[in-house]
Amino acid sequence: MERLLIRVTSLVAFAIVLATDILYVGLIGSQGQDFQPYVPRFVASYLAVMAGLIVIALLPRPEIFAIRLPMRAAAAGGLLALGFLAAFSIGLPLVIAAGVLTTVALTRTSRRPGSALRRLAGLGAALLAIGLLVAGLEITGRLIVCPETGTGSGTGSGIVTSGYSYECNQGSLRIH
């Protein structure tokens, strides 16, 4: 059984991520039509996966012990990266609370023989979570849905690639 500090910080981080996800989905859903509908869906799904990693890492099962550190590292890295990228919208609670709390739980996770391999796996898991976040935002940001009637335009920014602008005109899309 893990220490009380790890259980409490993990459960608080889980609650913050889950509440942020629910509020985010509600907020995005109330905003009406969006030319980039897949970005919020990706972010909401990503938050759900991070919340799942946090809570699954708490399970007192022997098969979870070996992957507990990588799961927490992935959740901490993913939440801190998303919090940094979304600092002016949903990011503040993710960075200040959930990312830091998950990092605290990660640093307190039991170290037993073979922990060097687990730490390396944790680093790999954190980098994979961040890479998935960046790739998902890059891909879904360019999946623009134009309505069949009317016009609209907007811009997008890339994390790895350059920014872009788009125009929708009667269902036809032009990207610049």
Image: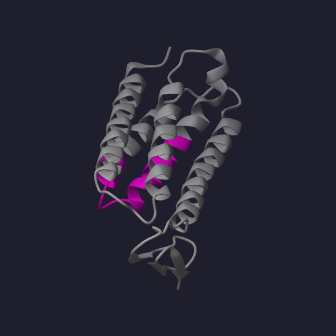
Question: In the drawing, does residue 31 fall left or right of residue 110?
Answer: left
Query: Percent from the top left, x then y, of residue 25?
Result: 36, 45
Q: Give the range drawn in magenta.
A: 74-94
Q: Which residue is drawn at 60% across and 53% down?
A: 132
Residue 6 drawn above or below residue 34: above
Q: How many marks?
A: 0
Tell which of 141 and 119 is nearer to you.
141
Q: Which residue is drawn at 33% across and 49% down?
A: 29
Residue extending farthest to the bottom is: 176
Question: In the drawing, does residue 13 fall left or right of residue 133?
Answer: left
Q: Main secondary structure of the magenta part?
A: helix
Residue 113 drawn above or below residue 74: above
Query: Percent from the top left, x then y, of residue 42?
Result: 50, 51
Question: In the drawing, does residue 42 fall left or right of residue 66?
Answer: left
Tell me, yes or no, whether the highlighted magenta stretch contains residue 145.
Answer: no
Instruction: Determine which quarter of the picture holds residue 153.
Output: bottom left
Tell which of 34 and 1 is nearer to you.
34
Query: Percent from the top left, x then y, of residue 146?
Result: 48, 69
Q: Residue at x 39, y 32 (%)?
A: 14
The reply to whether residue 139 is in sight is yes
Residue 115 drawn above or below residue 35: above
Tell which of 175 and 112 is nearer to you.
175
